Image (cartoon, helix red, strand yellow):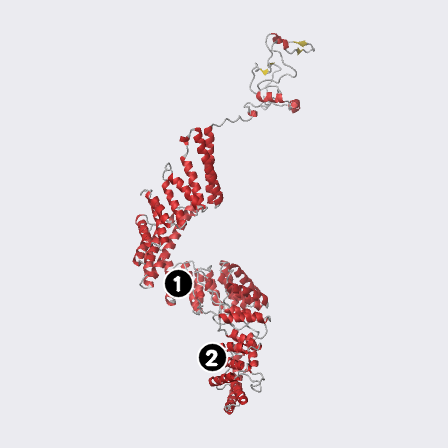
Amino acid sequence: MENVHQAAEEDDLYSGYNDFNPAFYSEFENDVGFQQAVRTTYGRRPPIGGKFPGTAIGARPLFSSSGSRMPLASSMGRPVTGAVQDGLARPMSAVKAAGYSSTLTRGSAFDPLGRSRGPAPPLEDTPEEKLKLLEKKINTLIEESCMAQSTGNLQLALDKAKEAHREERALVKQREQSGSADHINLDLTYSVQLNLANQYEKNEMHPEALSSYKAIVKNKMFSNAGRLKVNMGNIYYKQKNYHKAIKFYRMALDQISNAHKDMRSKIKHSIAVVFIAMGQYSDAITSLEDIMSETPNITAGFNLILCYHAAGDREKMKKAFQKLISVPLGISDEDKYIPPNDDTSSKMVIEAIKNDKLSQMERDLKARAEKYITTAAKLICPAMDASFASEFDWCVDMVKNSQYVQLANDLEFHKAMTCLRQKDHNQAKEILKTFEKKDSKMKSAAATNLSFIYFQEKDFDQADKYADLAMSADHYNPAALTNKGNTVFVKQDYEKAAEFYKEALRNDSLCTESLHNLGLAYKRLNHLEEALDCFLKLHAILKNSDQVMYQLADIYELMGDRQQAIKWLMQVICVTPTDPHVLAKLGKLHNDEGDKSQALHYYSESFRLFPCKIDVIEWLGVHYIESQFFEKATQYFERATLIQPTQVKWQLMEASCYRKSGNYQKALETYKEIHRKFPENVDCLCFLVRLSTDMGLKEVQEYATKLKKAEKMKEIREQKVKSGQGSTAGGRREGSGGSAAVVSTHVPTSPRKSGVMESQPESKRFSRLSDSEGDSNHSSGSSRGERLSAKMRSLTVSNEPYEADSQKELDASYMDPLGPQIERPKTGAKKRVDDDDDFGDEELGDDLLPE
């Protein structure tokens, strides 16, 4: 017992069993037989070089400690354990603990479960299992086809549907060959063919789709396949084969029982839509009335009103409107989105369901219903024989007593806009003023429109007042900020106006009116680079806006870059090729560049399109006089005489052209006619005296006497003017110094610009300022009007035969159509174009606003 000792608690009783140096079995790593024996444990490794005999004769001798061989005692009577006989391994006869050994044998690791053997070989599939795998593959192809269609990849969806159809045909053939035709999956066959027909229809392969649908409908093994005739009717409707569409819709309707009311209602609505497309409104009314009596819905009610309107049945329109507003939407109250308590988890759940797909569907349904009701009310009111206001009031009262109470304000707003279109401004203002007690959104919209109306009427104080009211109700309303900027702009406080426009753009970067007006403000401040940047941005938004391109051309002209100005005006011509004012502008720029031929071309085109523009007529007349084509110049001065019969200079130029062309008799008659209209005109009398003298007429003395009297009267007038010049010079200087370019704020009269925007509660009404073509910031140099007047004076009183001996200026009664010289800009400003100029006058731009 002295050799027996207890093991310590921390000692591991089984340690050391698996410790093994890998160097001991390195020689067996490449031995295939050894590795097979270790893996299978079917037997030990066979001896190298021979077999062991099955009896004791072949037993291996054991060596004793002295080195002599000693046979085992048991080797004489039984075979050695593990010996191999006839090449087969014999099981071991010894029994030991599973996996536990005090010595390591052949380097085998501990593996009681035999995991080192690897997975079991797969079992052979039966024919039925192979068919089930094929069915699973077909279902996967159908799902992939549907997913591809949902993502918009229609071609891939069709390819997957065709592949599924091929696999399904192969599956049916295999079942028939294997004798299991009774186990054919009809649901799978139906799904494959229906999906293929749908994909054909989505890819607009209508003949193939109809063929697939017919194959399904004719198969009696498919229950409820008759409903697919609705799909066939839809295809015929797309092909505009309305008679066949109605036929298939009715066949589908006959095969659906009365228990499916919703489906029958949808098919009836499809039939009504086909009748509407065919123009058979009475048949459509019959189907829609049937729907509204059984299962009323918003779409059918709205289409019924449209059919009554097309048929001219006004009283039934009102009855259908009452049915329309009484249709229940089936949308639960908004109170379900209010958390019952302060529980955080409940709030998170409510926030999650607020924006889910079901909530979005409810919002879309409600928005569509409101749109239909508002449109129906707008359609009903002008259709009645009674006054517009009374009918609109009836619609508003009906809406107020329905579930759509919030739409009453929108209808009243629309009434105000309709009155505005009918030029009934007072009625529109009265209606809009009633919104001052409404909620902030409606109040801001109404005040914005009132500000616009007063601005158009040039009542800038009231416009400023309601612009402030709109801003106080909703300070982030870009329309209100734009109108406020406009009221400041007309007061010539351009820097402050620019601030309002910038704030409007910060609230809405796509507010084109604010961007346009900001460019005009910079233009007035002579910040041409900033103005150019604004209009280039606006051009990026409004690609085909002729007004924006014209402003760019004008800014480039102010900057002295005539080539860029011509380039932008050419783009304007591409958009509006028949605008005479743009053509005249191009003629002026080419004339300034010295290109007379191009200038003549554009001025001639402008005169052809608008033969009443005086500056164009004047340029053409002077050009032909300089070119010695007096007969052609006479035509233009005759036109100018018709346009301005009180201006003596055009008639003098006409007579001068006759005289220079050698037609003295016609010139004399023209001068006599001028003297009859303007008896005190000195120039006309001078020409009459000279012509009468040279032609030997008796009226010489008479005209000479009149000439002396006219000259005395002229001297008296000049003395009066000189005597009063000293007292009025200061006033004139103040008036001329205080004069500045005024913003043109007249209401446009052209059809393109006369519309007033109709507003919903969120709609806005604001105007875009206008800037005249003439501006005091032009480059130095004499104006075109001054140059032409100088040319005409020199042409009229030149020292030629049959003219006055000395050059004299035109009489005081000679009124220059370009205005007195003292009132013109001294820095070479361009003359204003007429009020009907769409481009020179930068008008109130309500044409950029959507209706």
Q: Eyeballing the image, is 80 above or below 398?
A: above
Q: Tag on residue 102? A: none
Q: Position of residue 291 (x, y in %)?
A: 32, 49
Quadrant (top left, top right, bottom left, bottom right) of the N terminus: top right
Q: Nearer the viewer, residue 306 or 377?
A: 306
Q: Nearer the viewer, residue 701 or 288?
A: 701
The amino acid beneath tag 2 is Pro
Q: Nearer the viewer, residue 665 or 138?
A: 665
Number of numbered discs visible in the structure rendering: 2
The amino acid beneath tag 1 is Met
Q: Position of residue 348 (x, y in %)?
A: 44, 45
Q: Tag on residue 645? A: 2
Q: Which residue is mark 1?
A: 417
Q: Eyeballing the image, is 510 above or below 719?
A: above
Q: Residue furthest right?
A: 67
Q: CA distance from mark 1 to mark 2?
A: 43 Å
Question: Which residue is at 49% across, 44% downward?
Answer: 155
* Element under disc 1: helix
Q: Eyeballing the image, is 269 above or below 518?
A: above
